[in-house]
Amino acid sequence: MTTEINGNGVAEETVAEEPTTSTDPKMGSGKGSAASKTINEAIKQVESFTENLGKALGSALQDRANVVMVRVNDDSLSYLDMLVEADVTKSRSESAAFLINEGIKANQVLFNRIREITDQIASLKAQLRESVKGEE
């Protein structure tokens, strides 16, 4: 409450209103609305991440008919176990398959270049074999 002098020189007491904040996202203003908007955006990001992770995991675990024995260091093992503990994968084997698949996708440019060079090497070896056979 404040006291102010009006235009007639008379003192008047006024009550200052506190600004209101709405928690209703439809209202569009206030702290509650901003927090609600931030939470909704975070939820959408988590849903998107979960959907993408599910797709990546599905493609990584498809047609796993080949067995590979591999030794890993303690750090790598902790990452494999982290995926299992978070229920992202069911086993260390699934975790390894998932991470290998993601590593290949992340380095596709490198693997394409390696494929080009190994194809050239195979072609040169075939030429060399034909050359040796011709001389016999």
Image (spheres, rainbow, N blue to C red):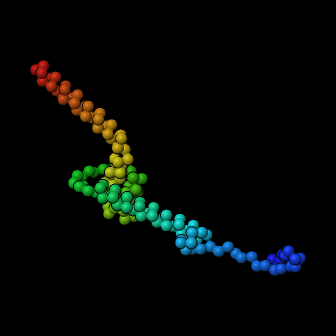
| Closest to the observer, 7 or 84 | 7
| Closest to the observer, 26 or 101 | 26
Q: Residue at x 67, y 73 (%)?
A: 19
| Closest to the observer, 25 or 53 | 25
40 with respect to 58 (left or right): right
The image quarter containing residue 86 is bottom left
Q: Residue at x 45, y 64 (%)?
A: 44
Q: Residue at x 29, y 38 (%)?
A: 115
Whether 52 is drawn above or below 35: the answer is above
The image quarter containing residue 51 is bottom left
Residue 134: x, y in percent? 12, 21
Looking at the rendered image, the quarter that the C terminus falls into is top left
Whether 33 is drawn above or below 1: the answer is above
Q: Residue at x 34, y 47 (%)?
A: 104
- The residue most toward the front is 8
Whether 116 is drawn above or below 103: the answer is above
Q: Tell me, yes or no, if residue 81 can be seen here.
A: no
Looking at the rendered image, the quarter that the N terminus falls into is bottom right
Residue 20: x, y in percent? 65, 74
Residue 135: x, y in percent? 12, 19
Q: Tell me, yes or no, if residue 15 can be seen here.
A: yes
The mark total stands at: 0
- The residue most toward the left is 136
- The residue most toward the top is 135
The image quarter containing residue 15 is bottom right
Residue 60: x, y in percent? 30, 55
